[in-house]
Image (cartoon, rainbow, N blue to C red):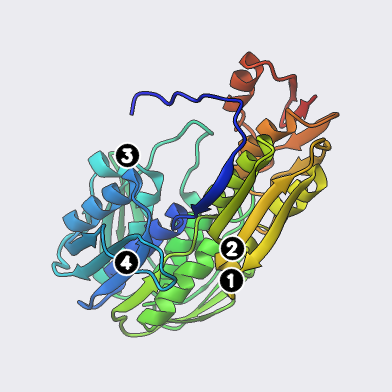
Amino acid sequence: MDKFVVEGGRRLEGRVRINGSKNAALPLLAASILSAGKEVTLAGVPRLADIANMARLLDELGVEVASDESTDHSTDGAKASAYRLKPVDTGKSHARYDIVRTMRASVCVLGPLLAARGSARVSMPGGCAIGERPIDLHLRGLEALGARIELDAGDVIATVPGGRLRGATIFLGGAFGSTVLGTANVMSAATLAEGTTVIESAACEPEIVDLAKLLTAMGAKSEGAGSPRLTIHGVESLGGAHHTVMPDRIEAATYLCAAAITNGNVELENCPLDALLAVTDRLAAVGVQSETLGGDDPLRAHCRVTSERVLKPVSVTTQPFPGYPTDCQAQLMALLCLADGNSAITEKIFPERFLHVAELTRMGASLVRQGATVVVT
């Protein structure tokens, strides 16, 4: 698609269903490499370019990939794509740059390849529009498990000298907090390691909990997912499993903000409210109400979003989960452009994540950036 044409001035009303989470689905797809020739089925997978690229990468790595984009596969009645994945050629372990460069999350195959096949060659992912995001924490964690890491012509070459990774106690904290993809990589690798692995300063994001659920269904043993200390007890092998991807909390938060910006009345189905408490807290302070209408699972709620006529200013700082998510920072800034007063948004995860400031200013917003903080009038 070359462009979007948006006709403004309309109040958003109606109902929308939240899709499966891309950030959860990509590590889940990569985890299929860990299966000992058994089929892993993932339901509720969103239809996105990154997902298609990951499927293409897994196919090159010897995983048989089949998808069904028309049949109802999810446990809650959603119409979504399902992927059936089965490793059939364990001799392939090279993730080429041509595919890896299309998405940073392709680095998630590194841990599973090392654990299941004893070696991996994965191209280094590049930087992006919100700054360089190196994978040194991934490599440090895998080295602690006994992997030998070398760099050659932009590729990470990893091997397991003893044939099997060994459990260890690993600290994964970095300059800007924990690493989600790094936690996913090390956790996946540790499931087949000999002994027990303790990851301290593990990412607490719901996507990590979702990955832990799949790995447990495949036969892994762990506790502490969703907390800063994650413990994994290595097993000899993992099998197949069926799993439904969690709803996308960033997509849901975007609809929350969009409904508020237009003074709308919108119902969200399959909404992960329990993973959005920091977002709904700040939105409530602005004057946005999220009313639960039903749903037994707080991660798949049915809710209505409305807003007051006069929106109030707030201060917010992005933080690792369960703090306010950096991926929802731009949406909130757009909303606060319409609030009655001065707001302050401080970006603690990616201090350069302000490309939208200049564009909102072109549309008439009153924004002043001071380092990692933007004052919104």
Residue 175 visible, this orientation: no
Q: CA distance from mark 4 to mark 3?
A: 32 Å
Whether residue 374 is situated above or below residue 15 in the rendered picture: above
Q: Are marks 1 and 2 in contact (CB under 8 Å)?
A: yes
Per the model, the C-alpha gap separating discs 2 and 3 is 37 Å
Q: Residues within 10 Å of mark 3 (few under 14, many from 20)?
A: some
For marks 1 and 2, the one nearer the N-term is 1
Q: Earlier in the sequence, mark 4 or mark 3?
A: 4
- Between the C-alphas of marks 1 and 4, the distance is 19 Å
- In the rendered image, the quadrant that contains the N terminus is top left
x and y, in percent, of residue 28 in the image:
38, 64
- Please state which of residues 205 and 75 is positioned toward the viewer in this rendering: 75
Kindly state the secondary structure of the residue where label 4 is placed: loop
According to the picture, the residue beneath numbered tag 2 turns out to be 302
Kindly identify which residue carries mark 4: 72
Which of the 4 image quarters holds residue 377? top right
Which residue is more in the foreground, 173 or 366? Answer: 366
* Label 4: how many Cα within 10 Å (few below 14, some 14–19, many 20+): some
Element assignment for label 3:
loop
Which of the two discs, 2 and 3, labels the residue nearer the N terminus? 3
Q: Say whether disc 1 or disc 4 marks the residue closer to the N-terminus.
A: 4
Residue that numbered label 3 is attached to: 101
Residue 200: image x %, image y %?
61, 68
Disc nearer the start of the sequence (2/4):
4
Q: Nearer the viewer, residue 199 or 307?
A: 307
**Disc 1 target residue:** 295
Tell me: residue 291, above or below residue 131.
below
- Horizontal side of residue 258 vs 1, given as left or right: right
Q: Is residue 170 left or right of residue 256?
A: left
